[in-house]
Each structure stands twice: as C-alpha cells, then as structure tokens.
Image (cartoon, rainbow, N blue to C red):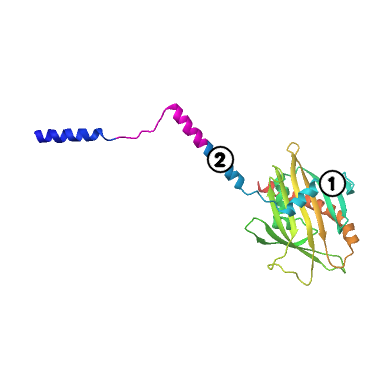
C-alpha cells in the first residue's frame, strides 16, 4: 500500500513539470495577427494581378472595330447609297486600289437571334444567299473559329471566284447585347485553290448586329467589306460593283431573315 502511494505521488509530481503552450488569444493579439494575415493576402493578390496575362485581341478584329467606329461624316467616307433603312459609304485608301465599303441597315420586327444565326450558320445561309454559292463549313477549330468556303458566279467571260475564310463569332462584343461576326481570308490544305476558280482575298469583312429597341422591335446590322477579287478584272469595275452588291446583299439577307422567322413561328 505504501509503495502504491509513493508511485501515485511521483506521478503527481511529474505532471507538475508538464508545460502546455497556449496561444495568446487576447483581443489585441488577435487583431495584430489578423492584420498580418490580411496584409499577406493583399500582397499575394497584387502579385497575382500583376502577373495575370492581358487578354489578347486579334489585330484583324481590332481593325474591323476601328473601321466601324470611324465617323461617317468625315472627309474619308463618301455616301454612295441612301435609301429607306439602308445607308452605304465607301472609302478610298491612298496605298490600296480596293475600296472599303461600310454600311448600316435597320430591320423592323426581326429578332436579334434570327439575324445572327442567319449569318453564322452555313446551312441557314444557303437558304437565302443569292450572291454567293456552295456554302460549306470546312473545319471548326479548337479556338472556336470556323473555316468556311463558298464561291461566286461571275458574268461571262470572267472566271468564277471562290473564298476560304476564317469566321469568328463574338457574343456580347464589343459591348453587351451585341454580336460581332468577323471574316478574313486564310489558306488551308483542306481546301486548296481549284483551277476553275480564282481565289479571292477578303482583306477585312464583318458584321455587327445590335438590338435597338424591343417595343417596337428594331435591330441594326452594320457591315464592312474590302475584297480583292484578284485576276485581271480592273479595280474600278470591282469598286463600281461593291456598293450596289452590298445593297443587294442586304436585301437578300433581310428576305432570308423574314423566311427563317416565319419557319420558326410555324414550328412553335
């Protein structure tokens, strides 16, 4: 019994030597530690912000936006067509014989989504396009762009033209509620040039679609087009055709949108 009491006493004495480290939880100390943590978080956040890469915008798309934003009232742009709901301008560049066409058309009663789908979907575009033929989606790339191919019938004895373009569709760009479609010529082994065609060069082309109002429903489409048809066609003939061709294209496009809207209403 005495031996057990001595062991018990020894255990009690030994436990007195055990020291437990408890952090200082006083309000002052907590506030100091919290401030330090927040400073480190802010520092790390700044470092991440500094190192974050800037979003790159395709310079070809920037070029299209720049042309769309140029004031039409300036000396560089000449109005060539001014009709109900459609206005078209042309611009001559000192270092390039091919003019740039820019225009805007107003559509009433046609929804915004019908307008961009009619342009973006190659199969839908076949149903209304009259200026261009043989629309084909060649490839959809990992970055979301698409290669499209089509041809254009030329009057005798001029050789027919064909086009191979990279198409980019950007929603909510350059502003929310807008759709930008950009086209530029590219080369690809999947669609090499054919002898029966002259491969045209799309220097800059695109469309910007906006919804202007819901009641009444009104949308607009702005267009830019600079295309070198290549070959032996005199540039002045190409330039003469460009403005009227753009007007005729807009009218065909509008009729196509009306037909697509009617088909959707029937299906619904």
Residue density around tag 2, few if under 14, some if 14–19, many if 20 or more, within 10 Å: few
- Mark before the other along the chain sequence, 2 or 1: 2
Can residue 258 be seen here? no
Instruction: Say above or below: 200 vs 29.
Output: below
Seen as rendered, the residue at the extreme left is 1
Mark 1 lies on a secondary structure that is: strand
Principal secondary structure, stretch drawn in magenta: helix
Is 156 positioned to the left or the right of 122 in the image? right
Is 6 positioned to the left or the right of 39 in the image? left
Residue matched to label 2: 43
Residue density around tag 1, few if under 14, some if 14–19, many if 20 or more, within 10 Å: some
Q: Which residues fall within the magenta stretch?
A: 19-38
Residue matched to label 1: 86
Q: Quadrant of residue 100?
A: bottom right
Give the camera-side residue of 257 and 154: 154
Can residue 31 be seen here? yes
Q: Quadrant of residue 94?
A: bottom right
Q: Quadrant of residue 156?
A: bottom right
Seen as rendered, the residue at the extreme bottom is 195
Give the camera-side residue of 15 and 81: 15
* Residue name at image x 79 percent, y 62 percent: 201
Rendered location of residue 268, percent (x, y): 65, 46
Q: CA distance from mark 2 to mark 1?
A: 55 Å
Mark 2 lies on a secondary structure that is: helix
Rendered location of residue 236, percent (x, y): 91, 60
């Amino acid at each position: 019994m005495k031996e057990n009491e001595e062991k018990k006493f020894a255990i009690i004495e030994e436990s007195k030597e055990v020291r437990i480290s408890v952090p200082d939880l006083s309000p002052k100390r907590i506030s100091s530690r919290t401030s330090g943590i927040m400073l480190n978080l802010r520092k790390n956040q700044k470092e991440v912000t500094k190192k974050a890469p800037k979003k790159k915008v395709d310079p070809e798309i920037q070029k299209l936006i720049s042309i769309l934003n140029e004031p039409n009232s300036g000396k560089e742009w000449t109005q060539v067509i001014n009709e109900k709901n459609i206005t078209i301008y042309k611009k001559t560049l000192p270092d390039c014989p091919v003019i740039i066409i820019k225009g805007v058309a107003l559509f009433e009663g046609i929804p915004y989504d019908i307008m961009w789908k009619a342009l973006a979907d190659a199969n839908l575009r076949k149903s209304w396009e009259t200026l261009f033929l043989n629309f084909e989606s060649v490839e959809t790339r990992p970055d979301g762009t698409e290669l499209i191919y089509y041809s254009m019938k030329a009057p005798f004895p001029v050789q027919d033209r064909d086009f191979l373009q990279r198409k980019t569709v950007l929603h909510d760009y350059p502003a929310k509620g807008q759709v930008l479609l950009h086209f530029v010529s590219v080369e690809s082994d999947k669609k090499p040039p054919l002898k029966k065609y002259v491969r045209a060069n799309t220097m800059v082309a695109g469309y910007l679609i906006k919804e202007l109002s819901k009641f009444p429903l009104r949308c607009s489409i702005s267009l830019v087009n600079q295309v070198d048809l290549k070959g032996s066609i005199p540039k002045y003939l190409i330039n003469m055709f460009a403005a009227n061709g753009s007007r005729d294209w807009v009218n065909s496009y509008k009729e196509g949108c009306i037909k697509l809207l009617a088909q959707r209403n029937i299906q619904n």
